[in-house]
Amino acid sequence: MRSIVRLWLNTFPRIGETADIARVAEDAGFFGVLLTDSQCLAPDPFVELGAVARVTDRLHLGTCTTNVLTRHVSVVANLAATLQADSSGRMHLGVARGDSAVRKVGLDPATPEQFGQALSELRGLLAGATPSVSATDSSLQWLDPSTSATPVLGVASGPRSITAAARHADGLILQVGTDPEVIRHFVELIRTTTPRPDFRILLYVIVGLSDDRGPDSTVLGVTPLLARMAAEPLRDLGAQQAPVAEAAAQSYSLATHGLSAAQGAVDGALEYAITGTVDECADQLVALSGTGCDELVVILGSMDTPTSQLLDLIRTVGTSIGPRLT
């Protein structure tokens, strides 16, 4: 059985608190922290990642996710390259087609074809090449050629977007729920699409820890919004989690995106997440090690979970679950 060799935390930027969250994650043993980019809902992740780079030594950092619709592809590449230099090579750029960040300003998500093109352009710019961007040869002229290129990670749920990322990115953050058979299906699709042995597959999961008061309801703020993204591919596969994902798609509201106010909107939403006691969550996550994924990205709580509660969750997952995954 393969081991999950890296454990990432995905969370929302918080003014004056992101650096503290990163320090706690580093001390708890996380490999890295990825920040969400949604300009109408949360502070800027790139600014906050600069703070993370300054207060940590080993912790890797990145986005999960940004897009190239609210910012030009060259701007995104420049931000990532700057953070790569400032962090001494610890930056990772997670890019998706666009969700709340684009919908809240009246834009549509990128098509899978546009997504693949953007990933290719980003990868070229960050490697110091001169790709054609909008029919113009473009490059980051200030980039130090001795600096390692920032890895570009596509983030996807559907087969067309997964295929685009497998062809054009350095890795993929796979967001298709927690059913091992579904995950194996898409891992096989990825490995068939790209022959690169160094292509990274990261699995994105929501973790809700139970205590003596019952299940962690804070994750209900993010579970429906993520489940809905995988509704179509899960339905096509006849997956066990398909009904929950379809219900999430039908009840989703942009107004409560990422907020705990979304809880209760979808019956059985927690079926899409990893939930239970520390031991139960650890066992479920260890079981995912056999799906062919190399890294694990966990989201804890919701956008409005109190920071003190989030820090406790980070410590618990990092120190009590993390060591069991390697």
Image (cartoon, rainbow, N blue to C red):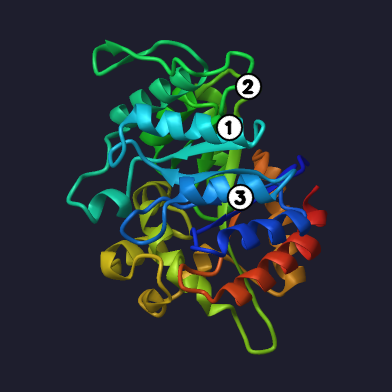
Q: Which residue is mark 3?
A: 52
> Which of the two labelled residues, at mark 1 and mark 3, occupies the earlier sequence position?
3
Q: Residue furthest bottom?
A: 213
Disc 1 element: helix
User: In the displayed structure, would residue 117 be above or below residue 42?
Assistant: above
Disc 3 element: helix
Q: Which residue is mark 2?
A: 148
> Which of the two labelled residues, at mark 2 and mark 1, occupies the earlier sequence position?
1
Q: Are marks 2 and 1 in contact (CB under 8 Å)?
A: yes
Q: Can you tell which mark lies on residue 84?
A: 1
**Crowd tier of the residue under label 3, counting other residues whose Cα lies within 10 Å: few below 14, some 14–19, many 20 or above:** many
User: In the displayed structure, would residue 214 be above or below residue 171?
Assistant: below
Is residue 16 or residue 206 the one in the foreground?
16
> Which of the two labelled residues, at mark 2 and mark 3, occupies the earlier sequence position?
3
Q: Can you tell which mark lies on residue 53?
A: none
Percent x, y for residue 274?
60, 64
Q: Are marks 1 and 3 in contact (CB under 8 Å)?
A: no
Marks 2 and 1, how far apart at CA: 8 Å
Percent x, y for residue 84?
58, 32
